[in-house]
Image: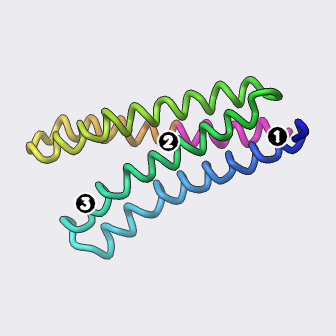
Amino acid sequence: MSSSYLQMASLLVVAGLFGGMFLFSASFAAFLFKYLPPADARMLIRKAFPTFYLFVIFSAGLAGLLSWQSDAMTTAWMASVMFTAIAARQWLMPAINLASDMGHTKRFAWLHGFSVLLTLGHIVVAAAILVHMAR
């Protein structure tokens, strides 16, 4: 496959990553909490986040692989998104759930806030990579 096709495929994967993260973060949780009782919304969010993180991990990894030969910056940034999403899925998310279950409101607020900032960071990185790749 030629380099230009790999670059185009990487661009499309990053665009999907950006759109998926933005949609999930900006609307999914708000939608659930608007239309479901809080306990049901929290349970559904807990079930959705592992899949969300797998989507981020897979998409960022694939975009990095597709850009490996032609764009070191995209590869590096997508690798950073992938590895931080792995850490969030494997360690941060369980810590957030445990803090919530134990009623540790301050710890929950801090960890949840950190996860929100991390996801916003991932969205910003994906947007920056889209702009970089479109040039």
Identity of the residue drawn at 37% across and 52% down: 49
| Secondary element at image label 2 | helix
Q: Looking at the rendering, in which quadrant would you find the C terminus?
A: top right
Q: Residue 133 colored magenta?
A: yes
Q: How many marks can you see?
A: 3
Residue holding disc 1: 7
Query: Which class describes the residues within 10 Å of circle 3: few (<14), some (14-19), or many (20+)?
Result: some
Tell me the element at label 1. Answer: helix
Q: Residue at x 30, y 41 (%)?
A: 93
Residue at the far bottom in the pictured view: 35
Question: Label 2 belongs to which residue?
Answer: 120
Measured as percent of width and height from the top left, residue 117 is found at 43, 37
Q: Residues within 10 Å of mark 2 (few under 14, many from 20)?
A: some
Contact (Cβ within 8 Å) of mark 1 with mark 2: no
Residue found at x 38% / y 36%: 88
* Alpha carbons under labels 3 and 1: distance apart: 39 Å
SS for callout 3: helix
Using the numbered discs, state the Cα–Cα distance from disc 1 to disc 2 in whole angstroms.
25 Å
Q: Amino acid at mark 1?
A: Gln
Amino acid type at image mark 3: Arg
Note whether 131 is above or below 19 in the view shown. above
Residue with the mark numbered 3: 42
